[in-house]
Amino acid sequence: MCGCYVNGDGERITSFRETFAMLSEEEQDKYFEIFKKGMSGSFGHNLFCTEFGEAQDAEGNPCENLQELFLKLRDSELEDDAILDEFYERVIAAYGYRDNYLILLAHDSYDVPQRTSDGYEMEDASEDVYSYVLCLLCPVNLTDYDICYDAQSHSFRNTNRRWKLEQPMHAMLFPMFTDRMSDITGTLFYSKDAKDIRTDMLASLIGSITPISARGQREIFGAIVEETLGGKCEYDDVRSIQDILSDRIEESKDAPEPLVFSKAELSELLSDSGVSEESMQRFDMVYDSVLPQERPLQATNIIDTKKMEVKLEGIKITAKPERARLVTTRQIDGRNCLVIPIDDEEVFVNGIAIIGGDKTGPEEDDDEKTEE
């Protein structure tokens, strides 16, 4: 395990190398938490497979991607200081983080067990050895002042602030582990914040077609639907699309790969949702203007399968998908209105029953908290 501590000005404060097995058990456990966090989350949201391509530096000039450097790091098992220094400098130049952080590198190898035809793993029979390098970019922040008990003076004292290693913001695993073997064509990239994938850093280090964040995919999908329908998108259109998407996601929940939609599959989805042939004639032009380079959109990123949300200024209505059909649009006294029939429904405002309410109040559902 190696590390390079960097300040907010991009200057190296110190570097270190540790033999992991020589650390105390408590230290090992803490580092394991950090390592595991750097490979957590779901694919298409926090985790992305990024293939090496033509990299560019901060000025947009072509530069070598990190593939050869990663190979050298792996093959040297982090024992070559010159290779480490070159890697640190590349990452520092590309990352541009404005506070203190640690570039943390770990090397390990994994004996891939044989698998029988019926899927049973034979732990004592290895087919291959997966040797890899994990790179984590972890903020280092000052702790707060705390009043703690001081055993020596038998009193409570103000503790000194210390620089604390935080959970990683970004991470790269090389090589990828694909079909139970090493895949040196790219890295598995992790971003703690799904909205901050750092495409600029990936362009400089990996050179891949940078992934689109979950939020970005939803915005792209929304733009495609709105423009395909020519600005005449109605509530029932969106609800129909949501219903079909939810069904497709449910059908594919046991699949090994997440459900994604290509351009052709997205076109089919809109047609199946009842979008008119006249509107679908605009689809190709709209898609190409929104996504000049075709990119698959992940189903779980473009809709929320747990709720249907209606928003206007100062008002938000959320409903479970199966209850979304209660909400309709109607003209009343010449005005377009959202209508929710209540009939025998129990209605509560700030927990107070206003129509047919049960005096015991509504059942609380922390996961949903729907307002209908």
Image (cartoon, rainbow, N blue to C red):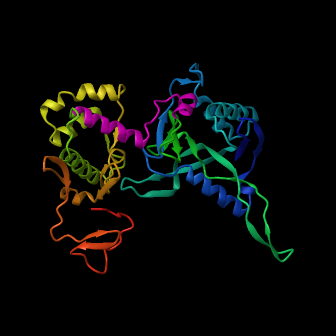
Of 186 and 9, the residue lying toward us:
9
Q: What secondary structure is the magenta-colored segment mainly?
A: helix
The magenta segment: 199-228
- Residue at x 15% of width, y 68% of height: 343
In the image, what residue occupies the spot 48% across and 43% down? Answer: 195
User: 182 or 345: nearer the eye?
Assistant: 345
36 horizontally vs 114: left or right: right
Q: Is residue 53 magenta?
A: no
Locate residue 255 relative to residue 150 in the image: left or right: left
Compared to 166, does 184 lie above or below?
above
Q: Nearer the viewer, residue 238 or 183?
A: 238
Res 225 → quadrant? top left
Task: Judge by depth and name the residue closer to the eye, 122 or 360.
Answer: 360
Q: Is residue 72 above or below residue 121?
A: above
- Marker count (numbered): 0
Tell me residue 364's x, y (percent).
Answer: 35, 72
View extreme (front): residue = 333
